Image (tube, rainbow, N blue to C red):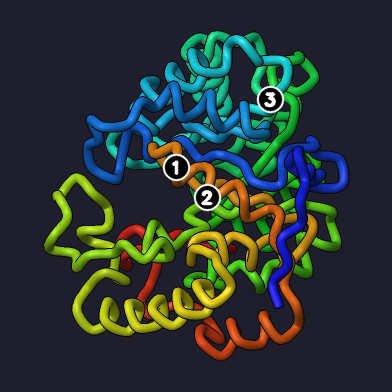
Amino acid sequence: MINERQENNLPCRKLGRDGPEVSAIGYGAMGITDFYGSDSENDAIATIRHAHEIGVTFFDTAEMYGWGENERLIGQALAPVRDDVVIATKFGWTREYGYDSRPGHIREVLDNSLRFLGVDHVDVLYQHRIDPEVPIEDVAGTVKDLIEAGKVGHFGLSEAGPETIRRAHAVQPVAMLQTEYSLFERDVERLFPVLGELGIGLVPYAPLGRGFLTGTAKPADQYDQSDMRSFDPRWQPGFFEKNVEAVRQLEAFAESRGLKVSQLALAWLLAQSDDIVPIPGTRNIARLEENVSAVHLEFSDNDLDRIAEILPTGGFGARYPDAVMPEWT
């Protein structure tokens, strides 16, 4: 059965062979400014500060999340505890949703991020998406220079495939890979061998299936057009009903053990490897506390078998529409 370990502090995990040590669950800040509709009921700064108060030390933001607004909120919220936390940000998108990882642009974006965050360095700098026009060796070399200059702590990649990871790692060690990974989305498991070989940690974004694994999903047409769930394939007719049924079964299993389905989903991720640190995002303090408490859960083999029976290979429907699906090489 699932056991809850009573601990006062959050356990920590080391991300990658040479990466930072962080809380076993981090905080993904994307949703506090973009992509999940408006929210006038929850105070983002209060939520971020509470995350740190309950033990979270890993905070994830990006240039494109509000084009500075998200980073400003993170910087303001974490200013009093800057030396106690790991802040990650990203470069690589343009405002027109194209790619730009030219070395000069990387430096420009980082300087802006440092200004928005109000810090003199970031602990992790990710390439947000692979730029097909810029050799990954040039990207890795630029980040290496920034690390040597003291402006960056560690290099990360997001949505990169095995060849790209190897080529980048040969120039500047990659501490961690960020991609979508959850009970609903399993594609990254085919990258586990290369991540293990090179000693690279995994940071799953959307670890709750963009909210589907909270048991609160509505059909796509009930979301505002600014909310990405309005066009996510998993919310579309045909797939939506199958995913609802899978979550219903997971909820029943979780409830029989006194858990929320979101806690079950996060604990499942943590059980896959010690090199995994998910970054769920929420603007609600109660949800935040539920998420963080998942680090204290343990699974038996029977528990894992039951979850595998419900979702053996993931959810139903792709994680992005075809036009914006990341391509791994």
- The type of residue carrying mark 1 is Ala
- The type of residue carrying mark 2 is Glu
User: Disc 2 vs disc 3: which is toward the camera?
Assistant: 2
At x 64% / y 46%, what residue is drawn? 25
Numbered tag placed on residue 286 in the rendering: 1
Tell me the SS state at disc 2. Answer: helix
Residue bearing mark 2: 290
**Depth order, front residue of 101/173:** 173
The local crowd at label 2, few if under 14, some if 14 to 19, many if 20 or more residues have their Cα within 10 Å, is: some
Spatial CA distance of label 3 from label 1 is 22 Å
Tell me the SS state at disc 1. Answer: helix
Contact (Cβ within 8 Å) of mark 2 with mark 1: yes
At x 75% / y 78%, what residue is drawn? 300
- Closer to the chain start, of discs 2 and 3, is 3
- Closer to the chain start, of discs 3 and 1, is 3
**Depth order, front residue of 187/86:** 86
Residue bearing mark 3: 85
